[in-house]
Amino acid sequence: MNQMISVKDASSYLGVSPSTFKRLCERYAIPLHRTTGGHRRIDRADLDQAYQYFWNGSRKKCVSMDASDADGARQIVKHLLDRNIDTILETIWEQLETPSQLSQVLENTLIPALWNMGELWRTQEMDVYQEHICSNTVCTILDLLLCRLPKVDSTASLAIGGTFESNLDSIASKIACLVLRSIGMRTVDLGCNLPVTSIAKAVSDLQPSIVWICHTHVENPESIVENHRLLRQSLASSVRVFIGGGGLSPALRRSLCQCTYFESMTMMVEALKAEPILAT
Ligand code: B12
């Protein structure tokens, strides 16, 4: 039998008030059922779907940003559009006391700007070509930051990663690469749109201890499950698979085995700092 969830629990799961929840269900045609006593209930599968609709990527993050952060994000988007690379680069660099704080600084600067871009694109306030200019500028900034980081020890643990086939987002993987490098790991970004067989070949050639996979865009959840199964099958049990990305619904996350999901890059960094994997 399907698991039915009350409006109170469902809205707190999504992080909105019950009245907003009902409004959003109406807007997105998410079915609410009534118990014999007249109380509204949502099917667990529909709740996962609702999570995807409402909060995937930018929406939740934009809504939950406070006004000054939202202003900051808009300002950065403007700089991205104008290709003011140096201004953004220096803004980020100035906030860094040590390289290992990079994930937090990105989460206060470039990442909210990406959410803001996503929202502007969704509401058609930003044209596709403008989104492409911004994305390319983001990629340039991430590449320049990588060059600025101190060299890592040649004996440090290696992490490699990218995105599966049909995910064309190169940004998330560049961020993962940069952030892991900032805490002293050797890193290789394999880029986006990779056949799983190619990731397996890279693992066999390069022998990393960590493989990261980013799921910003999810077109077909079944293929994600299958690709993760194939990837895991090809890896030694000692190799760890780290995943994240706004495209992963809770249901999809639950169906991916033997990998560790992180809500943010900083959470991955904190987890790694707390254990000795950083040494070979
Ligand atoms: C840039 C961008 C693109 C660019 C990418 C360019 C490039 N050079 O890479 C391009 C043009 C390819 C693109 C295309 C599309 N896009 Co787009 N895109 C974006 C945008 C603005 C930024 C994406 C991004 O890189 N975000 C940054 C990542 C890093 O954010 P994130 O996934 O939330 O990840 C965070 C955490 O989850 C975590 N994390 C992520 N991965 C990992 C991995 C590990 C290991 C760890 C520890 C943590 C972690 O860290 C991140 C930072 O906090 C987003 C808006 C947004 N919300 O971000 C839309 C967005 C993702 N796109 C969207 C859409 C709809 C599309 C298209 C389908 C549009 C279309 N109709 O063609 C296509 C799909 C293409 C494809 N098949 O991949 C939607 C997705 C909605 C949904 N429900 O899935 C979004 C959310 C915009 C929106 N508001 O609607 N896109």
Image: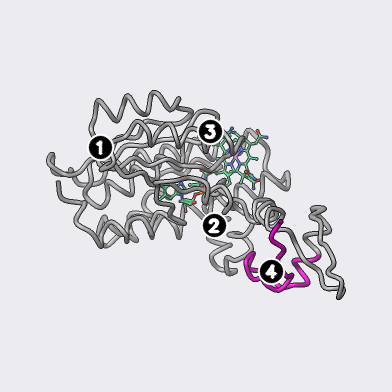
Is the shortest distance between ligand 1 and the CB of mark 1 under 8 Å? Answer: no
Q: Position of residue 78 (x, y in %)?
A: 56, 49
Judge from the rendering whether residue 96 lies leftward or rightward of residue 258; answer left or right.
left
Which quarter is ligand 1 in?
top right
Q: Position of residue 221 (x, y in %)?
A: 59, 39
Q: Which residue is mark 1?
A: 208
Question: Which residues fall within the magenta stretch?
Answer: 1-22
Residue 253: horizontal and vertical position, in percent? Answer: 52, 50
- Provide the residue designation for mark 3: 167
At horizontal 27% and vertical 62% (from top left) the residue drawn is: 97
Kind of residue indicated by mark 3:
Asn
**Front residue of this view, candidates 122 and 79:** 122
Residues at circles 3 and 1 in contact by the CB criterion of under 8 Å: no
Q: Which mark is residue 11?
A: 4
Neighbor class of circle 3 (other Cα within 10 Å; few <14, some 14-19, many 20+) is some
Residue density around tag 2, few if under 14, some if 14–19, many if 20 or more, within 10 Å:
many
CA gap, disc 1 and disc 2: 35 Å
Q: Is mark 4 within 8 Å of ligand 1?
A: no
Any atom of ligand 1 within 8 Å of the CB at mark 3? Answer: yes
Residue name at image x 47 percent, y 56 percent: 263
Sequence-first tag of 4 and 2: 4
Q: Is residue 231 above or below residue 59?
A: above
